[in-house]
Amino acid sequence: MYRKNIFSIVIAVFVMALAACTPTTVATDTSNSTVVPTAISAATSDVASTTSPSSIAPTETVATAVNSSAESMDPNLACSGGKTSASVTPELTEGPYYKAGSLEQADLYQTGMAGTKLIVTGYVYDTNCQPVANALLDFWQADANGNYDNSGYTLRGHQFTDENGRFQLTTVVPGLYPGRTEHIHFKVQAPNGQLLTSQLFFPGVAQNDSDGIYNADLLLSIQESSDGWQGQYNFVVPAS
Ligand code: FE
């Protein structure tokens, strides 16, 4: 009887010892569980990387939108046709007829205005061909008879590029005046950037060759149609 009790106690102690060992095993499992956060962390980073593409998606969408718009642009223009760098648009003299304080207006055409209606579209890019949003464009020009409005602001107006760097100017084809070929004056400036002054020209005008200011790098790309002309030009400003 006494031996049985002793044996029972020994068994009990052995079982307890085993039981005491079990937490050690659990502790090991617990230490393994500290690996779990790493796995979770990895999983989280996977989630993050899964999230990233979706957060990039809008940018890709915008880029696609720009590219699809750019596809309709003349590939010979600056930053068009897949080009990734460009020279800054050449500067030319301001001339005597600039007036500060023009209205913010992209449509300078007025009903009944003489001359051929002209819509110029394009983009403002930096020298890395990145579109410049909210860039200032200030246009002024002679009317179809070669006269500037120096008392008012007819055919004068400024505008800002949209979020894709795009602009649109509605106007008329300017006329000739003594000593000059057809041209549209402009100023362009990226936000907080350098103000650049120059002039746009028209292809196929005989007086281009005799105009000392004319620069072929400033030629509009023109498509003529019965209801007006479509012009394209991409301005390039210094990268910020
Ligand atoms: Fe002029």
Image (cartoon, rainbow, N blue to C red):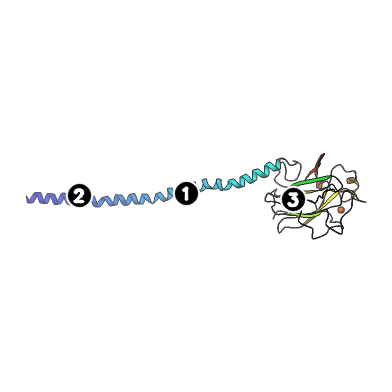
Q: CA distance from mark 2 to mark 1?
A: 43 Å
Residue hosting label 1 = 44
Residue hosting label 2 = 15
Residue found 75% across the figure and 54% down from its top? 159
> SS class of the residue under badge 3?
strand
Disc 1 or 3, which lies upstream in sequence? 1
Q: Whole-percent x and y of residue 190?
A: 72, 55
Q: Check contact, mark 1 vs mark 3: CB within 8 A.
A: no
Q: Is residue 11 left or right of residue 217?
A: left
Q: Of the residues tagged 2 and 1, which is closer to the observer?
A: 1
Q: Whole-percent x and y of residue 134?
A: 70, 54
What amino acid is at disc 1?
A: Thr
Q: Quadrant of residue 192?
A: bottom right
Residue situated in front as seen by the camera: 92 or 224? 224
Residue found 77% across the figure and 49% down from its top? 169
Disc 2 or 1, which lies upstream in sequence? 2
> SS class of the residue under badge 1?
helix
What amino acid is at disc 2?
A: Val
Q: CA distance from mark 1 to mark 3?
A: 43 Å
Residue hosting label 3 = 236
Residue found 23% across the figure and 50% down from its top? 19
Q: CA distance from mark 3 to mark 2?
A: 85 Å
Give the residue at the far front of this rendering.
112
Within 10 Å of the Cα at label 2, are there few (<14), some (14-19), or many (20+) other Cα atoms?
A: few
- Whether residue 55 can be seen here: yes
Residue found 22% across the figure and 51% down from its top? 17
Give the residue at the far bottom of this rendering.
101
